[in-house]
Image: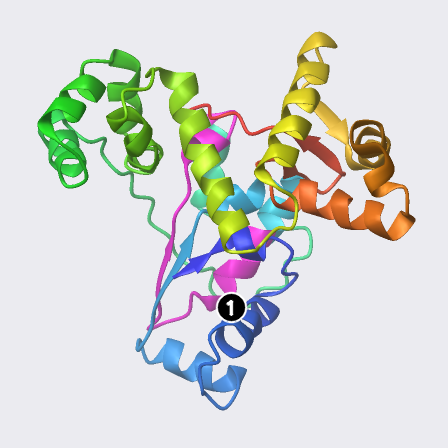
Amino acid sequence: MIPLRDYAKAVSVESLFSEFFFRKHEIPIPGYSAFEQLNRMGKLLLIFDGFDEMAARVDKQQMINNFWELAKVVVPGSKVILTCRTEHFPEAKEGRALLNAELQASTRGLSGETPQFEVLELEKFEDPQIREVLLLASSEEVVDRVMGNPQLLDLARRPVMTELILEALPDIEAGKPVDMSRIYFYAVRRKMERDVKAERTFTSMADKLYFLCELSWEMLSNDRMSINYREFPDRIRKLFGAVVQEEKDLDHWHYDMMGQTMLIRNSRGTIRQPIDRS
């Protein structure tokens, strides 16, 4: 199970698997050639999870190149699944063309027969399934409250998005207001709190909230939904003053605010706040 959001910068399938097998999990196989043999023998089920999260960080052609790079592991005998939210693609036709392997990579050097793919679509959850999932984590009263909200019920129909509601359950159970924007807020806050507790970040929750609120207000008031990463240092100096006067401190804050908040950066250096279009 390889979460592609963690490997968006991988330039080759070889480097991706080297990172995953040898560095992250320290799996004791002799080398990449051993992985290739096991893959051809059908001993592995490879699940590339969240292609849309990788694609969101690069331009269209690089996204196509990445698809074909991952497709290198599709050989006779292999078992490979690539998951992707089709809502990521502005046009459904474009998304299906890519996932059907109809779009060509500019750097593609495949020889022999082109890998064959089949596109499967997950059905949305029905009401009884939503209730069953939510009851595993909460009470009848709270589940009735969620399912009584048409927006939240529609959100919960998407298996991936159900996790947002599950993340927000403690706040819902505490009797806090419930609507679409607050569900996102509760879920995102809990995610960032986990990052702080796990010491994946050195800035505090207050620092992040302050920075994101100021950045959001600037974007909304100027009708500008993105900002280039080169503008970040000036924003950080303005908001945090003496704390980041030293250049090395500014660098630490710069990368922490980009990498440990919910901001998304593409290959052109444009940074935007995540907006779910599903």
Quadrant of residue 141 within the rendered picture:
top left
Query: On the picture, is 199 further left or further right than 250?
Result: left
Q: Amino acid at mark 1?
A: Gly
Q: Position of residue 177 (x, y in %)?
A: 34, 15
**The N terminus appears in which quarter of the rendering?**
bottom left
Quadrant of residue 233 within the rendered picture:
top right
Query: On the picture, is 24 further left or further right than 130?
Result: right
Residue furthest to the bottom in view is: 30
Query: Can residue 138 be seen here?
Result: yes
Query: What residue is drawn where x is 29% and y is 43%?
Result: 120
Closer-to-camera residue (193/99): 193
Closer-to-camera residue (17/119): 17
From which residue to which does the magenta span run? 66-91
Query: On the picture, is 92 further left or further right than 179?
Result: right
Q: Secondary structure at mark 1?
A: loop
Q: Position of residue 244 (x, y in %)?
A: 84, 42
Where is 76 relative to 196, above or below?
Answer: below
Query: What residue is drawn where x is 76% and y is 38%?
Result: 269
Query: Can residue 103 be seen here?
Result: no
**The C terminus appears in which quarter of the rendering?**
top left
Quadrant of residue 132 within the rendered picture:
top left
- Taking the magenta stretch, the answer to whether it contains residue 84 is yes
Where is 179 relative to 204, above or below?
Answer: above
- Taking the magenta stretch, the answer to whether it contains residue 201 is no
Closer-to-camera residue (196/22): 196
Q: Which residue is mark 1?
A: 112
Query: What residue is drawn where x is 17% and y is 31%?
Result: 130
